[in-house]
Image (spheres, rainbow, N blue to C red):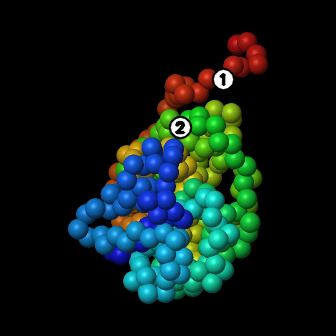
Amino acid sequence: MNITIWNERSCQEQKGKQKKAYPDGMQNAIAEIFSEADFNVTVSSQNLEDDGLSEELLKKTDVLIYWAHTLHNKLSDETAERVFKFVSGGMGAVFLHSSHVSKPFKRIMGTSGSLKWREDGRHERIYTVSPYHPIANGVPESFLLKKEEMYCEYFDIPTPEEIIFLGWYPGGELFRSGFTYHCGEGRVFYFQPGHETFPIYYDENIKKILYNAVHWAGKQDSPVKESFVKESCPMAMPKDINISLPFKR
């Protein structure tokens, strides 16, 4: 499978806290997830010709992984339309974190992609709410990210075909953190975690999700063989949740 991992900044342009989180560059950290022989990985960035998303590159791309944050408006409308054309023609796409307001994502969604956010570096608990979806294969019922940017509803997107993951934050905020669509012949997955100053893409659960997502978007997914789903049972309070009840039992 041919994967293109695209970032708005080249590895050399990533400085400060981002460089500390990803010494070899964020896109290279993501590329390590796909180091197996059956993947051909190309790393690209916006500083290249045609915004690093040329017709020639997209023609040979089975799945595009797209991360962007602050340079959305510098991407040309022509490039956004080119990405849309290839996705609707059958190329898979995985949009990460703040790419929710990127031109290609908004072109595919047909909405603003707006949401509420807070960059406080507190933890996030992600719940798997569609455990039988191939993207959730091998992912636990829930897992904790120690530091992440808070995203909160309302998220201005069309109703997803399937919501696979929900994010919960210590302020009580909720977010649809992982969901799927079809765009013409192409499959699209959006996944919220990935603020550039936190080493999210080294987390084993995140790596598993991205690995599964690329297989799904590239139409090489397989049915879930095992699931954490069991009969109804009591549940202890997660250690990361600290809530003072307004009443006495």
Q: Residue placed at 55% from the left, 49% from the top? A: 195
- Between 183 and 79, the residue placed more toward the observer is 79
Label 1, secondary structure: give it. loop
- In the rendered image, residue 104, in percent from the top left (x then y), is placed at 61, 73
Left or right of 81 in this view: 40: left
Left or right of 35 in this view: 76: right
Q: Residue placed at 43% from the left, 67% from the top? A: 5
- In the rendered image, residue 209, in percent from the top left (x then y), is placed at 43, 55
Disc 2 residue type?
Answer: Lys
- In the rendered image, residue 201, in percent from the top left (x then y), is placed at 43, 50
Label 2, secondary structure: give it. loop
The correct choice, above or below, for 38 with respect to 29 in the image is below
Query: Badge 1: few (under 14), some or many (20 or more) residues near its Cα, within 10 Å?
Result: few
| Residue 101 position by quadrant | bottom right
Disc 1 residue type?
Answer: Ile
The correct choice, above or below, for 190 with respect to 129 in the image is below
Q: Please report whichever mark, 1 or 2, sits nearer to the chain's N-terminal start.
A: 2
Pick the quarter of the image with the N terminus: bottom left
- How many circles with numbers are drawn on the protein? 2
**Contact check, label 1 and label 2, Cβ < 8 Å:** no
Judging by the rendered image, the residue that carries numbered circle 2 is 147
Judging by the rendered image, the residue that carries numbered circle 1 is 243
The correct choice, above or below, for 113 with respect to 172 in the image is below
- In the rendered image, residue 168, in percent from the top left (x then y), is placed at 61, 40
- Between 49 and 194, the residue placed more toward the observer is 49
Instruction: Decide if residue 205 is in sight here.
Output: no
Q: Residue placed at 43% from the left, 59% from the top? A: 11
